[in-house]
Amino acid sequence: MEQQASMNKMGMISIKKLLISMGLPMVISMALQALYNIVDSYFVSCMEDTEQIANMGDYAVNALTLAFPIQMLMVAIGVGTGVGVNALLSKSLGEGRRDHASKIAGNSVFLGICTYLVFLVFGIAGVDVYMKTQTADPIILDLGRTYLGICTVFSFGITMYMTYEKLLQATGRTTLATIAQIAGAITNIVLDPIMIFGYFGMPQMGIAGAAYATVIGQTVSFVMDAVFHYQFNRKDFDTSLFYSKPEKEIIKEIYKIGFPAIIMQAFMSFMTYGVNIIFGTVSSMAVTAYGVYYKIQQFVFFAAFGMNNAMIPMIAFNYGKRDKKRINEGIKYGMIDTLIIMLIGAIGLQLFAKQICGIFAVAPETQTLCIRAIRIITLGYLFVGANIAYQGIFQAFGYGVSSLIVSLLRLIIVALPLAWMFTKFQNAEQIIWAAFPIAEAVAFAVALIFMRRIRHKTLDVLETA
């Protein structure tokens, strides 16, 4: 009975209330995930100049900007795999298949370990090569190698906490996942200044301190998520490590949905990597400004992705139950809530762009470029919100490829060529930012077409049945 009550949460509670109860913790969780990167950037921007190096803060932020695509790639693989696990696990619970749900959960743990091993190898052998593809500046290279090397070699915290976080979210226990996320974020915030600047008897570690604070915070979240999973999720399925034994068919099921989601999330990493190179042909200040802006925008984007993560298990669960009414309500209110998040974010950034950019101790010219980026890019935020919502809807129905195409359009196919084209103009620093809202508008038009087709193939069939 206890298991049935838990399963019925996503099938019985009103959709509006369910979106708030599941979505709000996920929004907070995703916003806190963004906080990891912005906190590091803030504190390293405050690093003092040395006798040999002036504007150390700008160099440090630039190094973090160049390292950021790999951090995003780690998140992409974790989140993308989690999307597959989340949708399949929720659907299995909706169908009452406890043993199958147990196997999905166990194999997700196995895949989390495999993901860490990949980035461990990259941390040992690939960091130097990667950094040299973006810059030849010896100061930035040295700072970037130090920071990214630590973040990848000790990346077991981020890969495993995302694994257990998704397992908690799939069963509706989003509050527990958020508690673990908050604990990790607070740990990072507290340790950053202590380890970077050497407070309370700690040695002054500079940019290495920022990296160690990050991985320690991620490990705290991982440990707490794992404890919550093994204590509470066993009510819905078996959490025994026996189910972690890899099964080819289960892994294939996970990646049938999850692999397109990984690629979709990885596009954000590839786009940032491409933008770093393209903007680098304009000026190093443009690269730094983009890095600062991108970490600011994550608070808004990640909040929208939090609502996306709430929609996926909810729609997938009711799709498994074949409840058309609740599916339609999930689509409607999920879209509305996502658009509200993006509208609030756009207004807030437009009103307080100068104050927000002023937080970072970077050169005035870099701050001016960052403000300009905010003014232009936020004009497309409603398109962003609709695209993120549609991507979640497509994934919940199992149409991962459609979600992939929308992501490819908005992040790669349109954005990067436009950005490159704008660099050819004399006023490139002023107009390159327009590439992003234009790309979102194009992707939105395609998403509308996909939604019409998917609705016909899924919801119309349910009605007929």
Image: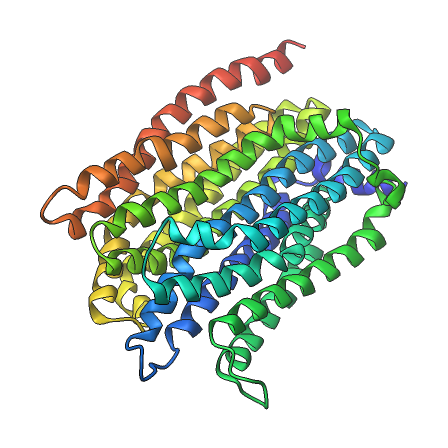
Q: Residue at x 58, y 69 (%)?
A: 212
Left or right: 32, with 387 as reference point = right
On the image, the x and y values in percent for residue 104 come to 77, 35
Quadrant of the rendered structure where residue 298 is? bottom left
Left or right: 219, with 65 as reference point = right
Q: Residue at x 52, y 50 (%)?
A: 126
The C terminus: image quadrant: top right
Q: Residue furthest bottom?
A: 201
User: Do we see residue 360 in this rendering?
Assistant: no
Q: Residue at x 18, y 41 (%)?
A: 422
Q: Residue at x 63, y 9 (%)?
A: 464
Left or right: 327, with 416 as reference point = right
How are the colours assigned in the image?
Answer: rainbow
User: Do we see residue 339 in this rendering?
Assistant: yes
Give whichever of 265, 101 is nearer the camera.
Answer: 265
The N terminus: image quadrant: top right
Give whichever of 24, 297 is nearer the camera.
Answer: 297
On the image, the x and y values in percent for residue 190 come to 57, 77
